[in-house]
Image (cartoon, helix red, strand yellow):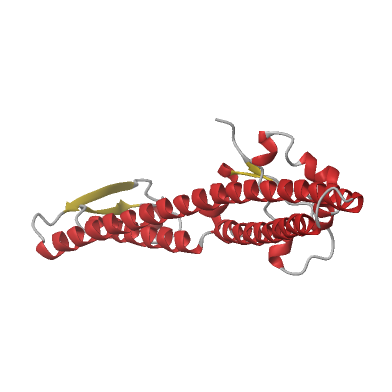
Amino acid sequence: MMEQTLPLPRSRASITNNPRNRQGTMSSIRSIIIAALAVTSLAGAQTTPATPRTYSLKECLDLAFKQSPDLARAKSALAVSSAGLTAAVGDMLPSVTANSRYNRSGSTASDVPLVPVGDSLPTHESVTDQYGTTLSVSQNLINLPVLAGIGQSIYSRKAAGASYDQARAALSYDVHQAYYGLVKLQKALQVALSSVDQSEQQAKRARLMAQLGSISRSDLLKIEVQLTQSKVDLLNARTALRAGQQTLATLIGL
């Protein structure tokens, strides 16, 4: 299945005032599935034309997962509950204590008392070094409060995980709906553009025929009314497209 992308739209003047542009929008099915996502116009008044930027569905999902405040809160709650479970389980783990000791005993040359001048110094030296390390391990076999805390932490962790998965799934659904909804709105815009073009061509021929007396004024009026209605439909299609752009842009954080 071909992945669809959403580029930024051209200005309104380039669409409405140039019939060649309107013909180009209906040239292929690919042009129909292209929808516009106006990033600059969503931020405020646009003073310069925005550079076209296309977004695939995957890019929209990645942006939404990265920037959604609701998903960020759910992820934070999941991290807190995971840390709480780790701390609760840690209370049941064995505790290890290590003690080291060192002892030196015996006599050295510095321990020999002073002797009269002329007497020989004793040379005997006896020193004993002792090293020792003690490891002790302790664990509570039954600690009901700790067990209850672990159970509560497990429940909280599962609940937070379920909330995160639900928030992610809901966001993914909303992005899919907005994305493909925007594609449908773009199709409707292409149809409206084509309808206006056809109505203008028909009105042009009708005016010429009315001048030649080939059709009545009432028939010309009907064609003019049809042209006016086509322009109203085009305006409504553009309005709906902007609303769809805003919906998707809000979801992906633009």
Q: Quadrant of the C terminus?
A: bottom right
Q: Is residue 18 visible to the viewer in this orientation of the structure?
A: no
- Would residue 248 be found to the left or right of residue 53 on screen? left
Q: Is residue 219 visible to the viewer in this orientation of the structure?
A: yes
Residue 175, image x and y in percent?
Answer: 51, 52
Q: Residue at point 73% right, 39% down?
A: 26
User: Front-most of 17 and 70?
Assistant: 17
Q: Residue furthest right?
A: 212
- Would residue 246 be found to the left or right of residue 173 on screen? right
Q: Residue at point 20% right, 58% down?
A: 150
Q: Quadrant of the N terminus?
A: top right
> What is the number of callouts on the image?
0
Residue 97, image x and y in percent?
Answer: 25, 55
User: Front-most of 5 and 70?
Assistant: 5
Residue 47, image x and y in percent?
Answer: 83, 65
User: Front-most of 154 and 200?
Assistant: 200
Dividing the picture into quarters, in which one does residue 77 lie? bottom left
Residue 148, image x and y in percent?
Answer: 14, 62
Q: Residue furthest top?
A: 1
